[in-house]
Image (cartoon, rainbow, N blue to C red):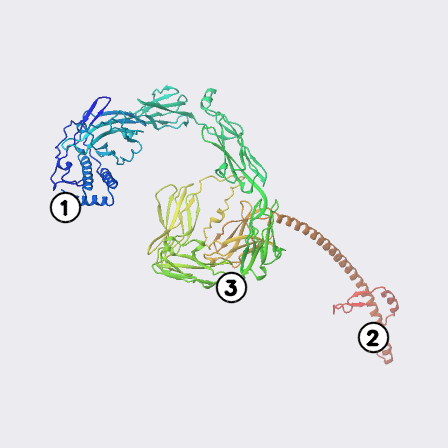
């Protein structure tokens, strides 16, 4: 018989265990119950129908935890067998258990084949197992007695449950000690501690290290249990069970009930923030919640005085919430929440203050809320950064200091520095070179090129939001080469680039190149162009371009030196052996196979072949399970509408990358989305224009519907475009100065197509006309290219890959023709700007087959922006904007060229002046000669008259001799000698006076 007693209250309790017999065929074996021998004492005794102890009202019946008890029982039995048996003892026990279950006739002698000692041990084991099983099975029969012991303990402390063992007839016998805890959630018993002689103790998870049996020399009972480090979950009912293995089964089990109350001092689970910033007129809720046993009481104090409820201040939810509906000056202060119970109390204080926003200024600004000095002190002065950091430019290796001095009331200012968003002390490259002074200044010594960036100073004194100011550090250093590839390849008879990887601050000015250790003058070579980044562009590679190259970059700070030598090898590029067709037309659901293959040139690697969508986009995920690629051939199965578009076969090796483009058209689909939507607005209407998407096939006609709504409104409105097929519509009746959203959708006989992108247009304001003297606002650069005239027609695609490179005689602007609708391009136009105003660069139209333009007169040191416009008959499309800074040395060249040109102009002017003088003198001399000719003509006429007279005299003489003188002939006087003397003075070039009207041949008169 077992007895347990509490030494302090002299209570004692005695429990007798009864085993109730049941017929074998009606008995249900519990999961943990093992069969026992019919000859054992436990099996022979019947159990009473009910316990004879009184019950506590509202106490539920307790049940054991069969799974864990069974596990312990089997484990204990087997360990005991292994200790006492040699060899196959475990197998014998298992066999005995099996035989007792399967063969009823063997129950009277389950171990008849074993020796006497072995049989007695096994019988003892079965008795022990049976008793433990029955103990757990019959735990429901125990009700909590009225004289249960109630114990109160403090959280975290320890307690001893005092339980005595009274042996039958005061004769010690073997017994099993088990402590159970009633689980309120399930109503079952949880065995937290089981002990039997030399077997290992069983301690439930959660109690390990906290429960133990008291020592035998203690004043407590030998079955007492010591529980330490008490938790709140330990609260509840505990039962001490003592089972004697050889006791009379008619008696109840020995046991005592205990109830443990766990008391805990208050502890906060929710508290308000330490500092709460408010503005006058705001409302706040201070929440303060605490846990503990008994439940803590919550009290509120303001500035050490209890809070008095008022129309604007109240305490709610059992004291856990303090609400202030309207903040006033008298509400500013310290609020303390106190939680207390019988075990102690805790407190938490929160400061409610008026927030003061910080601003960056040279002098601290007075607080606009501070009307009086007392109010200013209560509110706390705001702080200001008196010396903010400023942008600085330093040379590599120098020291930089950024100031950030701040003052505040209160003066506990904390200064933090950040670089590009990261604290400077956490930037690995700055860790050993950065110092923050007490006055807040940041020092970096020495600085490195990678230190360039934005540095931000943040100051706070705990009141309001932190204030910050930033500055930019620019580190200048000589231009340097960051990487030198040992080998670079140029594709034979194609364009190629030899890269020079440069890092420069300030901006790169120029790069010099050497080839085979000799200076290379690319500006004097027809096929070589120096690009803006310093690399060499070979417009058409030949074998002479192969060699060993080196580059040296320069900027305003000089150069770090030349690059290493790069072996530039000229090799033949890979070549297409099979190119895809220009166009593939298939129907929905069909498959298409695109062929592409290439071979490498001798001495080069085999090229890789891959397929991609237009402009380098990867194949869509929805296509991957329908695409099969074998070598360079690509097959797309079960075609869909989204497969429509351009595809590129890209062939690449170390020499060059080549590309072949093809278009896949899917017929028999709904229309594709319209694109290039433009809008022109008036005060009450918007006119939309667009380009049609693919209609789904040549046999399908496409109509359009406009979806539009006012921005911010959920509902859309629709308008059908008329006439059918039109790509322009005007929507009237719109509100002025309002933003609208538009989408265009095409439709054919198969259904509605895809929606276009959302187009946003704002109607004009109904504003009066601007005064004459007021200049209109500068138009954004892009708007020039977005607005289209009303009569605009189809647009070509945008020109691609616009670039500007410096050549020997100027700057070369190059581009590629559009991929879309290039056939409608009529001419190109080049626009440029150095400010917001765009201007036309080319004087005449650039033919569509030309894709480059030479500019000679760009100003050095300026930055230019270029666009190339592809013009159709009535519309155009613009390329992306290209930025090109002209090197400063071009300006020096222009000055030199101007000086030389001026000198040449002066020389030419002198030459022209001399020529003009000579021409004037020549004309004057000719005039004089003409006068001389008139005199000479007179002399000649006189000589001719004299000659005629002589002839007449001769004829007269002859006639006289013959008697035939004419009556009209008169003889003249012979003055030949006189005119000979006068004529000999002149040598006159010119025509003969007699022949002047007959011939223009010159002759000299002598």
- Position of the C terminus, as image quadrant, is bottom right
906 vs 578, nearest the viewer: 578
Between the C-alphas of marks 2 and 3, the distance is 114 Å
Left or right: residue 430 versus residue 106 is right
Quickly name the residue at label 3: 602
Q: Is residue 599 above or below residue 153?
A: below
Q: Whole-Å distance between the Cαs marked 1 and 3?
A: 91 Å
Question: How many other residues sit within 10 Å of disc 2, few (<14), some (14-19) or many (≥20)?
Answer: few
Secondary structure under the numbered disc 1 in the rendered image: loop
Q: Quadrant of residue 199?
A: top left
Which residue carries the number 2 mark? 967
Q: Residue furthest top?
A: 305
Q: Earlier in the sequence, mark 1 or mark 3?
A: 1
Mark 2 vs 1, N-terminal side: 1
Query: How far from the left and from the top, in percent, is residue 424?
Result: 50, 37
Q: Which residue is mark 1?
A: 103
Instruction: Answer above or below: position of 766 versus 376.
Output: below
Marks 2/1 in contact by CB < 8 Å: the verdict is no
Mark 1 closeness class: few <14, some 14–19, many ≥20 residues within 10 Å: few
């Amino acid at each position: 018989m077992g007895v347990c007693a509490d030494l302090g209250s002299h209570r004692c309790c005695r429990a007798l265990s009864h085993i109730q017999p049941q017929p074998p065929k009606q008995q249900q074996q519990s999961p943990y119950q093992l069969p026992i021998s019919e000859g054992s004492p436990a099996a022979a005794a019947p159990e009473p129908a009910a316990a004879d102890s009184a019950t506590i009202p509202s106490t539920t019946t307790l049940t054991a935890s069969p799974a864990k008890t069974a596990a312990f029982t089997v484990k204990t039995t087997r360990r005991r067998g292994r200790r006492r048996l040699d060899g196959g003892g475990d197998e014998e026990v298992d066999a005995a258990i099996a035989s007792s279950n399967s063969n009823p006739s063997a129950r009277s002698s389950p171990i008849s084949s074993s020796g006497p000692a072995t049989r007695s041990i096994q019988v003892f084991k079965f008795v022990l197992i049976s008793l433990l099983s029955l103990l757990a099975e019959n735990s429901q029969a125990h009700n909590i007695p009225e004289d249960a012991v109630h114990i109160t303990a403090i959280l975290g402390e320890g307690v001893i449950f005092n339980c005595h063992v009274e042996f039958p007839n005061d004769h010690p016998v073997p017994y099993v000690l088990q402590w159970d805890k009633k689980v309120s959630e399930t109503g079952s018993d949880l065995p937290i501690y089981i002990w039997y002689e030399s077997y290992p103790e069983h301690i439930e998870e959660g109690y390990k290290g906290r429960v133990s049996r008291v020592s035998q020399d203690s004043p407590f009972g030998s079955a007492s249990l010591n529980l330490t480090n008490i938790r709140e979950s330990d609260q509840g009912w505990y039962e001490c069970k003592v089972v004697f293995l050889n006791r009379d089964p008619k008696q109840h089990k020995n046991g005592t009930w205990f109830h443990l109350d766990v008391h805990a001092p208050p502890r906060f689970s929710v508290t308000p923030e330490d500092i709460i910033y408010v503005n006058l007129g705001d409302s706040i809720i201070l929440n303060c919640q605490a846990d503990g046993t008994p439940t803590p009481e919550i009290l509120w104090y303001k500035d050490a005085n209890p809070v008095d409820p008022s129309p604007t201040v109240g305490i709610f939810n059992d004291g856990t919430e303090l609400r202030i509906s309207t903040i006033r000056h008298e509400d500013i202060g310290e609020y303390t929440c106190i939680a207390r119970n019988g075990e102690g109390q805790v407190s938490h204080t929160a400061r409610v203050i008026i927030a003061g926003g910080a601003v960056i200024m040279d002098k601290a600004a007075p607080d606009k809320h501070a009307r009086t000095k007392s109010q200013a002190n209560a509110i706390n002065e705001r702080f200001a950064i008196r010396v903010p950091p400023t942008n600085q430019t330093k040379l590599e290796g120098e020291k930089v200091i950024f100031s950030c001095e701040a003052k505040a009331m209160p003066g506990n200012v904390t200064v933090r520095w950040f670089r590009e968003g990261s604290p400077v002390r956490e930037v690995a490259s700055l860790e050993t070179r950065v110092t923050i002074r007490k006055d807040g200044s940041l020092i970096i010594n020495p600085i490195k090129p990678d230190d360039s960036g934005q540095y931000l100073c943040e100051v706070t004194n705990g009141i309001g939001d932190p204030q910050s100011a930033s500055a930019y550090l620019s580190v200048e250093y000589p231009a340097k080469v960051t990487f030198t590839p040992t080998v670079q390849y140029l594709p034979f008879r194609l364009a190629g680039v030899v890269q020079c990887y440069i890092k420069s601050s300030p901006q790169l000015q120029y790069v010099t190149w050497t080839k085979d250790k000799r200076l290379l003058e690319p500006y004097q070579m027809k096929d070589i162009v120096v690009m803006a980044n310093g690399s060499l562009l070979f417009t058409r590679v030949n074998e002479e371009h192969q060699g060993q190259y080196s580059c040296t970059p320069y900027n305003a700070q000089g150069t770090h030196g030349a690059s290493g030598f790069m072996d530039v090898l000229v090799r033949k590029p890979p070549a297409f052996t099979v190119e895809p067709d220009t166009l593939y037309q298939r129907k929905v659901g069909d498959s298409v196979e695109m062929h592409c293959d290439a071979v490498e040139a001798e001495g080069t690697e085999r090229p890789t072949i891959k397929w991609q969508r237009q402009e380098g986009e990867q194949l869509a995920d929805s296509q991957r399970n329908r695409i099969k690629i074998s070598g360079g051939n690509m097959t797309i199965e079960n075609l869909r509408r989204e497969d429509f578009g351009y595809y590129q076969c890209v062939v690449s090796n170390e020499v060059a990358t080549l590309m072949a483009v093809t278009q896949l058209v899917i017929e028999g689909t709904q229309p594709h989305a319209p694109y290039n939507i433009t809008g022109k607005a008036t005060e009450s209407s918007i006119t939309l224009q667009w380009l049609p998407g693919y209609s789904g096939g040549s046999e399908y006609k496409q109509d359009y519907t406009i979806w539009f709504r006012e921005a911010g409104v959920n509902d859309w409105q629709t308008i059908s475009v008329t006439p059918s097929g039109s790509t322009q519509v005007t929507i009237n009746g719109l509100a002025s100065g309002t933003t609208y959203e538009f989408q265009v959708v095409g439709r054919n006989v198969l259904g509605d197509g895809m929606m276009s992108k959302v187009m946003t247009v704002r109607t004009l304001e109904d504003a009066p006309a601007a005064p004459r003297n007021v200049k209109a606002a500068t138009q954004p650069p892009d708007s020039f290219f977005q607005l289209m005239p009303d009569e605009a027609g189809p647009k070509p695609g945008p020109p691609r890959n616009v670039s500007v490179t410096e050549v020997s005689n100027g700057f070369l602007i190059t581009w590629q023709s559009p991929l879309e609708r290039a056939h409608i391009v009529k001419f190109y136009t080049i626009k440029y700007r150095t400010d917001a105003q765009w201007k036309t660069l080319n004087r005449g139209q650039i033919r569509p087959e030309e894709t480059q333009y030479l500019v000679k007169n760009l100003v050095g040191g300026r930055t230019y922006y270029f666009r190339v416009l592809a013009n159709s008959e009535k519309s155009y499309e613009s390329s992306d904007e290209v930025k090109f800074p002209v090197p400063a040395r071009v300006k020096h060249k222009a000055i030199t060229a101007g000086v030389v040109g001026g000198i040449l102009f002066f020389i030419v002017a002198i030459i022209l002046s001399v020529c003009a003088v000579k021409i004037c003198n020549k004309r004057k001399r000719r005039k004089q000669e003409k006068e001389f000719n008139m005199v000479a003509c007179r002399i000649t006429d006189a000589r001719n008259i004299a000659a005629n007279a002589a002839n007449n005299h001769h004829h007269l003489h002859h006639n006289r001799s013959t008697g035939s003188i004419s009556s009209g002939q008169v003889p003249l006087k012979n003055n030949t000698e006189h005119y000979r003397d006068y004529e000999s003075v002149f040598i006159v070039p010119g025509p003969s006076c007699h022949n002047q009207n007959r011939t223009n041949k010159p002759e000299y008169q002598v």
